[in-house]
Amino acid sequence: MIEGTPPIELPEEGPPLTRSRLKRLFAISSVVSIVGASAVFMSVTYAVQSNLGVLLATIAGGTVGAVTWWLMDSGEARGRLQIVLANLPPLGTIPTDSTSHAPALGTGDTADAYFEVARALESRTTGNVFVFTSPSPGQGSTTVAMNVAIAATRAGRRVMLIDGDTSPHGLRRYLSTGPTPGLTELALGESTIAEASRLWSIDAHTRLPMLPSGAPTPDAAILSSMAVANAIDAVAARADLVIIDAPPVGWSDATPHLAAHADGSILVVSASTDAAAVSNAGAKLFQVGAPVLGYVTNRTERSITPFSAIWKRFSVRLVLTALALGAAFAIFTGAQLWNSWTSIERETFSLADAKALLAVGTATTSTTHAVGTPVVEATTTSITIPPLIEPYDTFLLIGGDEDSGASDVILYLVMPTNDAPPFMISFPRDLYVDNPCTGGKSRMNSLSHGCRDKGINGGTLLSVQISEMTGINVDHFAEFTFEGFVDIIDAAGGIEICLEYAVKDDDAELSLPAGCTNANGAQALGWVRSRKTLELRDGVWRSMPERGDLMRNVHQQDVILALAQALKAFDSPQQLKRTVDNVADAFILSDTLSITKAIGLVWSMHSVELEDIQRIEIPVELRRTATNQSILRATKEVAELIADAYGDTLLPDSDTG
């Protein structure tokens, strides 16, 4: 034991790993680095609101956090290390010497330092068998053990150096005779100490006896055998000093087995040594009866760790901090987005259940009458059109007046998933169609009232009819009022409407100048609702050609595409969240549209050039009902229009050709 110094006081069971990690997590350096990284992250994301901004913020925050942690933790680590080592006597300090792997073989301050350690070891301890080790790799314990043995030999002491490290990092690096036979062969009874020992020539007058490590063994427990104990005892009886170079305690199970044969242990530490590793190493060595008798500080001129170690720790901290910031931002933004999403009103939607309740068939009806001829009896004709198999994402957009409840905008967007171009169809509100609820016929916009007797809402009833007309089932629908439409346009920052002439429509409260206007919500609503549009030509207000429902359909598509273009401009999670916030009160969505599906649809639109979206126009002619109501009749089935435009390109890849 160390003369006059009590044994190192260690925890009875060692520091619990969880407690140690939590302690490090809430250390001042960790807290300050996290706060600093978060502040930088928030500042950058606020200044650069884009996906690139989030990436830059993650990198900047991670870098600041890593640098702050490293600078502060280095000081804290040195402080913690000094506290742990306060209970152990220092046996010497070895300055940094990069000129040689074994600087004591030469001369100078480094060689003198090893002589001082050898003298301190002899004067301040009892016993003569010592294990030299370190708490963790990279502390230079092998170099220290070798050179202390050389210094003691040069001082006239009888020394035996034993290599207890079978890895390439032990004393075998300096041997030209090879590591076998050695310590492991001695433990297995395959060799004697006389056969395994070497004489290491230090200079012309000095020889150092040493025992190589032997061949690597998967069972480190053999090193605690009686054969090894007897051999070391025999050597110790004739030697002044026996030094066993052992692997780092926290790295190899062999060290405690070797330490069991020693009178005590010497720890080699440096500025990069972790205080917790020192405590753990001391506890393990104490348990096998080889308490730490003192420590040697190696590389004392290194106030920081080697560059490779610095870069490794810095990189790990940077990556972990960046990942933590990104995860926290994603969770926070996701929670806000989810809260906004859940505030949107929903309506139940099950197309299959609605079709079953309405007993919808596959036959379609078609009638033709001259303009002005009352529709008295419809002639039913069955048109056999093979149903199109559905590799699509489909979305029905319904807009109308909240007071009347009738739809004014009925727009169907079909997004094929097999690389076919998307298309949209506007259904005129006065289109005369089958009414699945009554079994008769009605204007299409009246379907938005739903089928109350069967508990079917308007969005579902319209979806049933459109699915039958197109042969493509509606996946989701969204309803908005005119007030909501205004809010949506305003939330998107307006849309661009370009006109050759100034236009107006007093009934629709429309007034737009010639040229391009960044129209607000109210102006865009007037444009899509106008049925009596006048344009200023040659100083005179004249009726716009082809005005009416068909022109409104074109305007609706133009505005929806312009709105989609404006919404495509958002390129950050913050903008997505604000967009959802702004339009949350404007929509009623079918309950089939989840947030993940909605985000997927929005992102899929990013890869679509809006001019590539095909517009399928329903050809119509003006007719009147028996009650003299003005209606529009489709002159060609919608499913046939789709088939004519796309052929078999809408079929799955396996069905084409």
Image: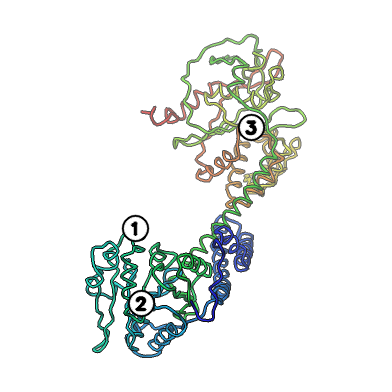
Query: Residue 570 vs residue 126: left or right?
Result: right
Q: CA distance from mark 3 to mark 2?
A: 80 Å
Q: Which mark is residue 591?
A: 3
| x then y, percent, for residue 359 | 60, 14
| x then y, percent, for residue 472 | 52, 26
| Residue that numbered label 2 is attached to | 242
| x then y, percent, for residue 307 | 44, 74
Query: Residue 296 vs residue 354: left or right?
Result: left
Give the vertical position of 252 relative to 382 (above or below).
below
Secondary structure at numbered mark 2: strand
| x then y, percent, for residue 562 | 60, 43
Residues at discs 2 and 1 in contact (Cβ within 8 Å): no
Nearest-to-viewer mark from 2 and 1: 2
Front residue of 82 and 287: 287
**Looking at the image, is mark 2 or mark 1 earlier in the sequence?**
1
Could one spot residue 343 in this view of the protein?
Answer: yes
| Residue that numbered label 1 is attached to | 219
Residues at discs 3 and 2 in contact (Cβ within 8 Å): no
Task: Please name the residue shown 56% across and 55% down the image.
Answer: 51
Give the vertical position of 168 relative to 96 (above or below).
above
Nearest-to-viewer mark from 1 and 3: 1
Q: Amino acid at mark 2?
A: Val
Could one spot residue 542 in this view of the protein?
Answer: no
Q: CA distance from mark 1 to mark 3?
A: 63 Å
Secondary structure at numbered mark 3: loop
Q: Amino acid at mark 3?
A: Asp
Secondary structure at numbered mark 1: loop
Q: Amino acid at mark 1?
A: Asp
Residue 229 falls in image quadrant? bottom left
Give the vertical position of 279 relative to 300 (above or below).
above
**Looking at the image, is mark 1 or mark 3 earlier in the sequence?**
1
